[in-house]
Image (tube, rainbow, N blue to C red):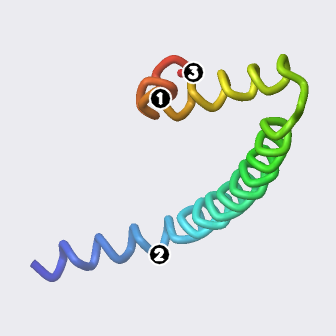
């Protein structure tokens, strides 16, 4: 039983730098996507306040599409 744990920890110490690099990249990507999504949301919000009917209609269609469509379906179509 101890040999199994020994193998586990040997593999863990061997792969730990890769795991840490993966965690760093995931955090960077999450931060970038969060900031980008926030900025895109602000842009769409202000466009929806426009007095031009065409701009208002386009932003309304955009919001209705993404609000009304399940996320898994959007991810499936993109993939």
Residues at marks 1 and 2, CA–CA distance in whole angstroms? 46 Å
Residue marked by disc 3: 78
Residue marked by disc 2: 13
Tell me what residue is drawn at x 90 percent, y 24 percent.
52
Disc 3 packing (10 Å; few <14; some 14–19; many ≥20): few
x and y percent of residue 28 in the render?
72, 61
C-beta proximity under 8 Å, tags 3 and 2: no
Circle 2 sits in a helix, a strand or a loop, which is it?
helix
Residues at marks 3 and 1, CA–CA distance in whole angstroms? 16 Å
On screen, 49 above or below 1?
Answer: above
Residues at marks 3 and 2, CA–CA distance in whole angstroms? 37 Å
On screen, 22 above or below 20?
Answer: above
Q: Nearer the viewer, mark 1 or mark 2?
A: 1
Q: Residue furthest bottom?
A: 2
Disc 2 packing (10 Å; few <14; some 14–19; many ≥20): few
Q: Earlier in the sequence, mark 3 or mark 2?
A: 2
Residue marked by disc 1: 68
Is 71 placed left or right of 39 in the picture? left
**Residue 48 bears which disc, if any?**
none
46 or 53, which is in the foreground? 53
Q: Nearer the viewer, mark 3 or mark 2?
A: 3
């Amino acid at each position: 039983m101890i040999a199994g744990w020994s193998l586990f920890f040997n593999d863990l110490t061997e792969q730990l730098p890769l795991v840490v690099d993966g965690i760093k990249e995931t955090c960077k990507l999450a931060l970038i996507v969060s900031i980008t999504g926030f900025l895109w949301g602000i842009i769409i919000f202000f466009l929806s306040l426009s007095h031009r009917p065409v701009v208002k209609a386009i932003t309304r269609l955009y919001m209705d599409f993404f609000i009304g469509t399940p996320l898994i379906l959007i991810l499936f179509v993109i993939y």
